[in-house]
Image (cartoon, helix red, strand yellow):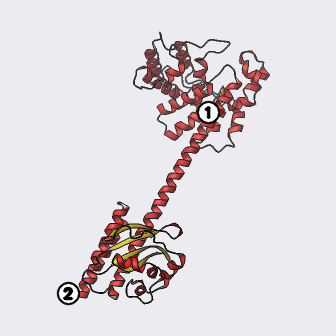
Amino acid sequence: MEPSTQKLIHTFGALADLGQEIAGRGDFSEMVRTSMHLLLGTLALRRGAVAECVDEGAIRCVSVWGVGDQIFTDFSISEAEKQEFLTRNVSDFLVSTSASATAFVSRYRERLLEEGIELVLPMIVRDEVTGVVLLGRKASGEEVSPDDFETIRAMVRHIGVGIHTHRLLEQVAQRAEENRRLYEELRTIYSATVRAFAAAIDTKDKYTHGHSERVGRYSEIIARELGWSEAEVEGIQIAGYLHDVGKLVVDRDIINAPYNINAKESSELNRHPAAGYEILAPINHPYADIPLMAKYHHERLDGRGYPDGLVDEQIPIGAKIVSLADSFDAMTTDRPYRRRRSFEDVVRDLRENSGKQFDPKVVAAFARALLKEVNGQIKERRITKMLGKDYLQGENVPTLLSDLITDLTGAGSEVRSYK
Ligand SMILES: [Fe+2]
């Protein structure tokens, strides 16, 4: 085989290796270092260095081989010098012999020769100088031939594209991270605003302190038990916080005397789910259906609810969850006109009203979540805490819950399904 053919094959092999190295997803500086090594090895050059152009004409060292890593200290490159690199012949990049060396080469000739650098090549990507490669003499002492120049240019182009692509990917990753952080911040702000809003709703009703917050939490617990995704769970929690937002447009006196209102006042109070929908619908919530969950939280499976008298399958599952959470909190908290009901009584109510007012699947999920807490299957006792430490004492809670779950889900269920 002719020596020139052999050399050509060798060069092709080196280019292929270089391509693979650059396309790899490994460590960046290792990639540049290996590429540099391949370039030097192919041409049997003694030393070399790679630097990239950064902001305002500065040059940053990326990799050195056989050269001190301080070589680029105090180096800079002007726009005019970059432009010159785009138009000159490669022979003008020779440091020691060129009579018409580029301005950049002339400016740093002394320093470059001190470090044994013989050739300064620009890395060019899409007609833009993105960095420079400095190369030393051949180990054999021979001059760099025109063929060598071509090989060097091809390899430098490869390295330039590799560095450029890597930096672009870095920028994309950085922007994605920034976006993620911004989104996270927005979510936190949204959630805090919603909770503040929920607290504001509750202050309108002097007897239901913390009600909206608890409804949000109960709803979240039920949705989680039903296997909803994290985003859906977050959505239902928000819906729980905001379910009574429509009360903001109802007269305070009516809200505070629900046991002593006439028919007209009662219909005024019953406007609150539809009013809530009107308030929430124009807002672009990050979770779907929040306005509908507020609108239908007083609907019943048997069609006797309001505002639209929907039946079972017409009611969104989210609204069914909020409805149960709302009723459960109402039954288990004191009001001025009545004490809260015993747990046994509450379970009886849930059993009787499953299939009429409440969806049995939703009631069963809530009972399962509470049973897991009571049995110690779940360490965090969130429901128990909301109920207060004395509430479940003295009651045979596990049996009550197990029986309820069996009745709602087991064979021979006595629960009448509406339909
Ligand atoms: Fe309500």
Q: Quadrant of residue 36?
A: bottom left
The residue labelled by disc 1 is 195
| 180 versus 252 height, above or below | below
Pick the front one: 175 or 340: 175
Q: Earlier in the sequence, mark 1 or mark 2?
A: 2
* Residue 282 visible here: yes
Residue at image position (61%, 20%) is 330
Q: Confirm or deny contact between disc 1 and disc 2 (CB under 8 A).
A: no
Pick the front one: 395 or 39: 39
| 23 versus 254 height, above or below | below
Pick the front one: 80 or 300: 80
Q: Farthest residue to the left: give it.
A: 1
Residue at image position (34%, 81%) is 151
Q: Amino acid at mark 1?
A: Arg
The residue labelled by disc 2 is 1
Give the image location of residue 351, x and y in percent.
53, 19
Label 1 Cα neighbours within 10 Å, binned few <14 / some 14-19 / many ≥20: some
Residue at image position (56%, 38%) is 235
**Disc 1 and disc 2: Cα gap in Å?**
80 Å
Give the image location of residue 58, x and y in percent.
49, 69
Secondary structure type for disc 2: loop
